[in-house]
Image (cartoon, rainbow, N blue to C red):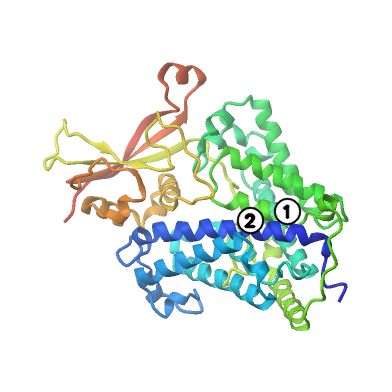
Amino acid sequence: MEWFVEGDYWWSRLVFQRVLAAVYLVAFLTAARQFRALIGERGMLPAGAHIRDTSWRDAPSLFRLRFSDRLFALCAWTGVALSAALVAGAADRLPLAVAMAWWAVLWALYLSIVNVGQTWYGFGWESLLLETGFLAVFLGNEQTGPPVLILFLLRWVLFRVEFGAGLIKLRGDRCWRDLTCLYYHHETQPMPGPLSWYFHRLPRPLHRVEVAANHLAQLLLPFLLFTPQPLATIAALAMAATQLWLLLSGNFAWLNWLTIALALIAVDGSLITGPPAPLPDSPLWYEITVVAVAALLVVLSYRPARNLLSRRQQMNRSYDPFHLVNAYGAFGTVGRVRHELVVEGTADTELAHGTLWREYGFRGKPTDPRRLPRQFAPYHLRLDWMLWFAALSPVYARSWFGPLVERLLAGDRDTLRLLGHNPFPDEPPAYVRARLYRYRFTTRQERRATGAWWQRDFVREYLRPTRLG
């Protein structure tokens, strides 16, 4: 049927699929390298216990059939291999049904991981990857034109990501309305990047321009996605540009890359590459499947759409256990002060005034004031992110911080692999403690004088010296 496909988005569809496959690859790689310490059989929050305490209806997952570290690793590395093949374009050389099954396997594997991941997988970009990945199953491959209904639903995802984030800001912190939030955000964001210090030191009038541009990108441009071309393409490219700006200013896992992919799917490829070659008709079974799936997702969109209009708007919420249609948003509140946990250990078996305490180093979160923040996104450092939340309130760390300390005291190798520096390479410490510090970026003068990127001041004890037993 001519109404079913849109050939002008053939090129955009292929680019979108490659970027999405790359995001999948990073997501599975993150899971494979970190799961043992986080949710493994001997992890801080073992997935097996979570499976026993929940039902199929609450959290569908293949691991309900059987969970073990070896099986989880097999699934995660299988996801890495399948994603890498999709990046190389393997699905475009296969029959349509096989290509769809390939994308469906990726989605099912990652859904299974997220639904046993507990607090470590409670981030909005997990649901965004699953919702986008589910739609990708029905997007077709090189041998078919992209279905209009799926293209529309992908724009609907992008609309909710951007417009939801814009509304949560306007309804939240006053600094978004008076354009001052970026006086603080680059310094207090969860995971600063190597350019965050420089962004923070931009003139304040430019920070206000940044906020105003953010409001434009999130509150106006999403509506233009549903206008005729080339206006929709211009809006999509402008939204992608704002995401590139965010990529430079901080580490937000794969959120920005996935949003860019969603923006690119709205770009009219014929404006760049010219009209596509004629495409064969889509199989009838495929058209029926796409229409049925689109109808289901339109019905499920009611609650997320209502959430956008609600004065009590929620952000990053899933409305079904399959994460098919979700609510998104970020930074409704911006911190004015940055607090960080500094975890220390000592080899001394008797504590005294002169006890030597040594700091554990983390890969992404600030610890050593002289260390320039690193670029890790789209790779997701789950422990580092949760430590940022733990510094905001102990409530966020209630379930896992104690197990983390126990594993440091035991010298657990899987946990130590998550760290950037282990000050006890030969044997584990006798005691571990945690202290809360206030961090701020140094001024230009302080930076020249000391070489440090951060200035920190002690606030209070977070966890008193603790030992095993």
Task: Quickly name the residue at label 1.
Answer: 264
State the residue lying farthest toward the bottom.
Answer: 285
Q: Is there a contact, CB below 8 Å, between mark 1 and mark 2? A: yes
Q: Taking 52 as reference, is 25 left or right?
A: right
Quarter-wise, where is residue 96 in the image? Answer: bottom right
Q: Amino acid at mark 2?
A: Val
Closer to the camera in the image, 316 or 201: 201
Which image quadrant: the C terminus? bottom left
The spot of residue 214 in percent (x, y) is: 70, 41
Q: Nearer the viewer, residue 291 or 283?
A: 283
Q: Image point 33% across, 37% down: which residue?
A: 460
Where residue 361 sits: x, y (%)?
A: 34, 40
Label 1 vs 2, first from the N-terminus: 2
* Residue 257 appears in the rendering: yes
Name the image quarter holding residue 140: bottom right
- Residue at image position (76%, 58%) is 11
Instruction: State the residue at coordinates (82%, 69%).
Output: 279
Residue 392 to residue 395: above or below:
above
On the image, numbered disc 2 is attached to which residue?
A: 19
Instruction: Residue at the far left: name it.
Output: 350
